[in-house]
Amino acid sequence: MKKTLILVAGMPGAGKTRFANYLSEKLQISLICKDKLKEIIWDKVHYDTTERTESKIYAGLAYDLSFYFCEMLMSTGQSIIFESNFTNAGVDIFQPMVQKYGYKVITVLFDGDSQVIHRRFVERDVTSERHPGLVSNDFFDDFEVFKKAAQNCGSFKYGDVMIYVDSTDYSKISYDDLIEKILSHK
């Protein structure tokens, strides 16, 4: 595969991380996951996730580290998968790196019915499987707050190729078909 940056983007609860992990395993490509970095930070610092300001500071740190690792991998010429809830503000960070290292960018954007995805997010947020550093502590329980965040993530547009995934119903998504689409654009 030509030097390719595969961005897995979309709103919270849309299924980005699960797909990115599958994609990384199948293609044997390094994966940068902002939320995984946030988990590692929380495990060391144990910041108060009920304090939205504090949580945002550590989320920002994880985001900055993610972009740093992305550039380090780009400098070696590796293809990379980068998963996060990107907004268009990220374009200003990606653009210089992509130009400097000559990468092709494929974005896989997970989107769908925001009410369905909101319900899924709220249900997931209170399970024991949810890492304590990622729990939103009811912040996104308000649908209007979630919808605003979802719109910012759902409007992310960057790359040579955009692949849209309706993740309203997971059972209708074929990861292998998505991989075929990605590989057809290499």
Image (spheres, rainbow, N blue to C red):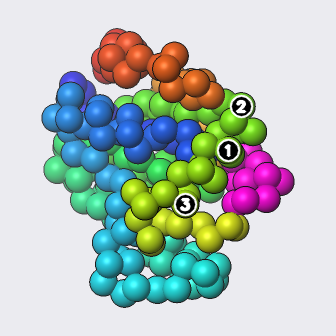
Residue 36 figure quarter: bottom left
Q: Which residue is mark 3?
A: 126
Q: CA distance from mark 1 to mark 2?
A: 10 Å
What percent of the width, then of the height, locates residue 138? 68, 67
Q: Is residue 43 magenta?
A: no
What percent of the width, then of the height, locates residue 137? 62, 71
Q: Is residue 156 left or right of residue 178?
A: right
Earlier sequence position, callout 3 versus callout 2: 2
Image height check: is 29 above or below 42?
A: above
The amino acid type, in three-letter code, at marker 1 is Arg
Q: Residue at x 33, y 17 (%)?
A: 176
What percent of the width, then of the height, locates residue 145? 78, 58
User: In this view of the protein, can residue 111 be seen by the observer?
Assistant: yes
Q: Which residues are drawn in magenta?
A: 140-152
Q: Residue furthest right?
A: 144
Q: Is residue 143 magenta?
A: yes
Residue 3 figure quarter: top left
